[in-house]
Amino acid sequence: MCFRPPGAAKNVKCPSCGMFNPPTLEKCRKCGTEVPKMITCPECGVTQSETNKVCINCGFNGKPGSGDPAKRK
């Protein structure tokens, strides 16, 4: 079993070949495709693609109070 420390960034899946890459890389190690940059939701702390318009965990959309209060950090 492997445990990830709180706040540790997750690997990013390449949209082209499916290879998981460290979040610090701009291009996939396997195929060279640009991988999405990752951001952290300011409301709940979940790491996700910067292309998401709404947080995948709490629904935060950039407007104050838009996220689910039960899922805030």
Image: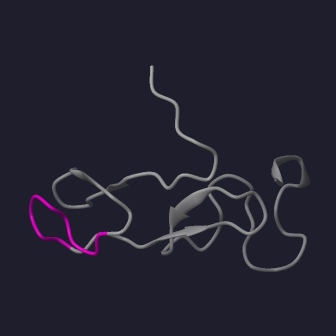
Image x and y of residue 59, in percent: 73, 61
Q: Image point 38% across, 52% down: which residue?
A: 11
Q: Image point 81% across, 49% down: which residue?
A: 71
Q: In this view, does 52 lie to the left or right of 12?
A: right
Please say whether residue 27 is one of the residues in the magenta stretch. yes
Quarter-wise, where is residue 64 in the image? bottom right
Q: In this view, does 55 lie to the left or right of 72?
A: left
Give the magenta part as a residue range.
Answer: 25-33
Image x and y of residue 22, in percent: 33, 58
Magenta stretch prevailing secondary structure:
loop
Q: Image point 52% across, 31% down: which residue?
A: 3
Q: Image point 58% across, 42% down: which residue?
A: 5
Please say whether residue 46 is one of the residues in the magenta stretch. no
Pick whichever, 40 or 62, lies toward us.
40
Q: In this view, does 66 lie to the left or right of 10?
A: right
Quarter-wise, where is residue 12 in the image? bottom left
Q: Is residue 71 left or right of residue 30?
A: right
Question: Against 48, is 18 above or below?
Answer: above
Most extreme residue toward the top, as rendered?
1
In which quadrant is the N terminus drawn?
Answer: top left
Pick whichever, 40 or 7, lies toward us.
7
Question: Against 2, is 40 above or below?
Answer: below
Most extreme residue toward the bottom, as rendered?
63
Quarter-wise, where is residue 65 in the image? bottom right
